[in-house]
Amino acid sequence: MTQFKYKPHYEELKDKWLDQQKDLQKGLLEKHKEAFEWLEHKSKQFVVGTVGSLIMFAQPVSASIAATRPPTPSQFEIPDDRAIAPETKLILDLTYSLPSDVQPLTEEQEKVIGQTLSRHFGMTVAAELQGKRLNRSYGIIGAEQHLMRYPGDTMVSHFDSAEDAAKYYSSGMAPGRGAWGYFADSASTMTQKDADREKYYIAVQTFLAPGYAENVKEHYEFYKYRKMLVVNPENGHAVVADIADAGPAQWTGKHLGGSPEVMKLLDRKDGKQRGPVLYFFIDDPDDTIPLGPIAVRD
Amino acid sequence: MKKHFYHHIVQIDSIQIALAGLDLQPHEKEHLIIIAETNIHHSVLDALLSELSDEDKKRFLVLLAHEEPKHNEIWDFLNLKVEQAEAKIKKTAENLLKKMHEDIKEARNKK
């Protein structure tokens, strides 16, 4: 008579529990497929991730156990490198804070998002500065044209290089001046700062800002070339821009406009060059933060 | 050890004690504990996700996927979105722990 041999305890429990784990994971991923795929898609923009690894982000595996354990207990590999790209951290933080629709943020949301942006970009930003705030801080941006920097500035004289001309010529130049006039008196007196102010300008609806009608002069001075951090919450791209024009009109359905260079940096990909952005005032009293692209800090 | 947001209501000490009664090498015991924790985690995730709307599922996953999940934020969210979230987590984990104890008992009795 052959004696039946039982598997050792470890083998028996391991096989049974791994089968159970397989079923649980399969059920979890199938049942909530859309949510996991969404998260994976969100992270894929900057991180090589899988649904499995995303689940495993929440796994409680201590370093000591991980170092001594036998083969991975899951069909998914536990990622050795859990580093998340800074842009992805920003996107995830914003995903949690932002409403699902592009709508005016509450003061509480603005506060949280202001802190998030300040942390990620290493500067102090806020929806309200010196008692002034725009009509909103989260809205739809659309593409604007180039602005005349000085009397006589044309599409021929406007670009620093052939490369820039090739990239941005097609945007054309607005027929009038910006809301604050020319950036310089002439080509010969135009500084790099003047040029950058046009290059990285945004147009915001100053005329809809609370209190604007009651004190136009004060608001006019406050908004002139005021620096703002503009962030595309869908990809983490950001630019330090300045307010150099007023608009767009309410009927356009847009809430702000960006120069061709700003739109390129924000990398709007929907073809129509419009989409949601966050725009917060930068507190830079000593004017130390340069205009232009800015990356999320590590 | 990195702790889950539910570590204060779900403990697997009883599994560790039960495994101590088996003929296991230390690394084998640790491996089984990892599997047990993973299975509980997936069960808890499934139980909570099943209570959430499609949009809230995404928000919950974002909270969990954070490099350093903020337990207080997760609980604020769950308390808002899931009725008796704590009790549901506890019950889900207890059901699975009970089954694991049966498995351990069965394995022990076979020898």
Image (tube, coloured by chain):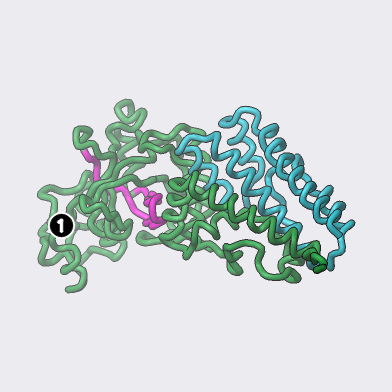
Chain colours: A green, B cyan
Which secondary structure dominates the residues rendered in magenta? strand
Residue drawn at x 36%, y 28% is: A211
Q: Is residue A284 shown above or below B59? A: below
* Count of numbered labels shown in the rendering: 1
Q: For mark 1, name the chain.
A: A
Q: Please indicate whether residue A49 sits to the left or right of residue A103 in the image.
A: right
- The residue lying toward the viewer, choosing from A286 and B8, is B8
Q: Please indicate whether residue B71 sits to the left or right of residue A282 in the image.
A: right
Q: Which quarter of the figure has residue B111?
A: bottom right
- The residue lying toward the viewer, choosing from A211 and B36, is B36
Which x, y percent locates residue B54?
A: 45, 38
Which stretch is magenta? A226-248
Residue drawn at x 45%, y 35% is: A131
Hey, which residue is sitting farthest right in the picture? B21
Which x, y percent locates residue A282?
A: 44, 49
Q: Please indicate whether residue A113 sits to the left or right of residue A189 in the image.
A: right
Q: Secondary structure at mark 1?
A: helix
In the rendered image, residue A83 lying in the magenta stretch gets the answer: no
In the rendered image, residue A239 lying in the magenta stretch gets the answer: yes
- The residue lying toward the viewer, choosing from B18 and B64, is B18
Q: Using the rendered image of the protein, determine whether residue A255 is visible from the camera's viewpoint.
A: yes
Residue drawn at x 73%, y 71% is: A67
Which x, y percent locates residue A250?
A: 22, 33
Q: Amino acid at mark 1?
A: Ser
Q: Which quarter of the figure has residue A185?
A: bottom left
Q: Using the rendered image of the protein, determine whether residue B67 is visible from the camera's viewpoint.
A: no
Indicate the quadrant containing the N terminus of chain A: top left, top right, bottom left or bottom right.
Answer: bottom right
10 Å neighbourhood of mark 1: few (<14), some, or many (≥20)? some
Q: Residue beneath label 1, please? A: A171
Hey, which residue is sitting farthest bottom in the picture? A162
